């Protein structure tokens, strides 16, 4: 008996899968293993998820911004008491009083710094009540009290354009750093001493080296843009015996609740500089 090999009909050929089916399978309609409905649900989930995260972030930022003030920082890393600085901007003032080139840099620095204190500029500001804080909580743009450079008298650079450097009796300007809202109690004034056995004669301008309360408080540069700090000028009355010797001078703010003796900060309420006049 003979046998015949049965061959499958064309329609019964075994179906084989290829690597292309893993990308798109035409029989099931799957793309990368998922149907269109499955991909749509995944896309919808991530749209809702990331939309929720974006909404939470936006809400958090909005709430945080409501707590901020454009003029006063919420968190201030500065100390409550101001530091002291001097002008000219040097802690070592060394010069020959007969050599204009040596002290010319100090004179020019003082002149440039005092331009904002010129009487013609300050006359545009307010005449304030002496001895009283100038509080302006109800005003958006804060006004400024006058501080004319003529108040510095012999250290104003008006009558003596060399600020005493040509005669060997230099002037040094002392000012406090700005602190928003600062209202020093008492009657703050500058007191300078030379670190030596015999005292050094000095003159203070304005009288007694006082910072008047009318220049406080300061409201920040956004609303107090033309504000200038009050100054105290110290004229060092050096004699010929003082020439060619380095003198260390320390200036402190006294008469108030402002700190001036913190060993961790040498500029908190005080400043130390050296002066040497060569002849």
Image: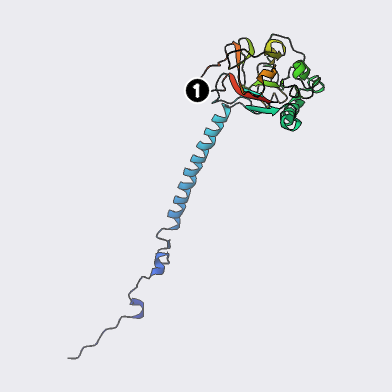
- Helix, strand or loop at label 1? It is loop
Sort mark 1 into few (<14), some (14-19) or many (20+) by Cα contacts within 10 Å: few
Q: Position of residue 11 (x, y in %)?
A: 36, 77
Q: Quadrant of residue 109?
A: top right
Left or right, 263 with respect to 249, comes to left
Residue at image x 69%, y 28%? 95
Viewer-side residue, 206 vs 77: 206
Instruction: Residue lying at the far bottom in this picture: please name it.
Output: 1
Viewer-side residue, 124 vs 12: 124
Q: Is residue 204 visible?
A: yes
Quick check: 6 above or below 256? below
Q: Position of residue 173 (x, y in %)?
A: 69, 21
Q: Quadrant of residue 16?
A: bottom left
Viewer-side residue, 172 vs 96: 96
Find disc 1 in the rendering and name its residue: 264
Instruction: Residue lying at the far left in this picture: please name it.
Output: 1
Q: Position of residue 1 (x, y in %)?
A: 17, 91
Q: Is residue 218 visible?
A: no
Q: Position of residue 61 (x, y in %)?
A: 54, 34
Left or right, 175 with respect to 146, comes to left
Q: For the image shown, how many numbered marks are present on the structure? A: 1
Residue at image x 42%, y 61%? 32
**Applied colour scheme:** rainbow
Quick check: 26 above or below 191? below
Image quadrant containing the C terminus: top right
Q: Quadrant of residue 100?
A: top right
């Amino acid at each position: 008996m003979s046998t015949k090999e049965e061959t499958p009909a064309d329609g019964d050929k075994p179906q084989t899968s290829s690597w292309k089916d893993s990308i798109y399978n035409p029989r099931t309609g799957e793309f990368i293993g998922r149907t269109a409905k499955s991909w749509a649900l995944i896309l919808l989930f991530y749209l809702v998820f990331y939309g929720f995260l974006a909404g939470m972030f936006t809400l958090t930022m909005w709430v945080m911004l409501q707590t901020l003030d454009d003029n006063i920082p919420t968190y201030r890393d500065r100390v409550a008491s101001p530091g002291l600085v001097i002008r000219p901007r040097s802690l070592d003032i060394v010069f020959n009083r007969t050599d204009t080139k040596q002290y010319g840099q100090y004179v020019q620095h003082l002149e440039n710094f005092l331009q904002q204190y010129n009487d013609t500029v300050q006359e545009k500001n307010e005449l304030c009540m002496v001895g009283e804080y100038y509080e302006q909580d109800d005003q958006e743009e804060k006004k400024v009290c006058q501080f004319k450079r003529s108040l510095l008298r012999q250290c104003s650079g008006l009558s003596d354009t060399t600020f005493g450097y040509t005669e060997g009796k230099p002037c040094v300007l002392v000012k406090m750093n700005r602190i928003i809202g600062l209202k020093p109690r008492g009657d703050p004034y500058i007191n300078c001493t030379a670190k030596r056995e015999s005292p050094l004669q000095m003159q203070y301008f304005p009288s007694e080296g006082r910072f008047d309360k009318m220049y406080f408080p300061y409201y920040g540069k956004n609303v107090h843009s033309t504000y200038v700090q009050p100054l105290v000028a110290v004229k060092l009355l050096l004699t010929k015996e003082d020439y060619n010797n380095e003198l260390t001078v320390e200036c402190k703010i006294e008469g108030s609740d402002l700190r001036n003796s913190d060993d961790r900060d040498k500029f908190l309420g005080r400043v130390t500089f050296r002066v040497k006049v060569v002849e």
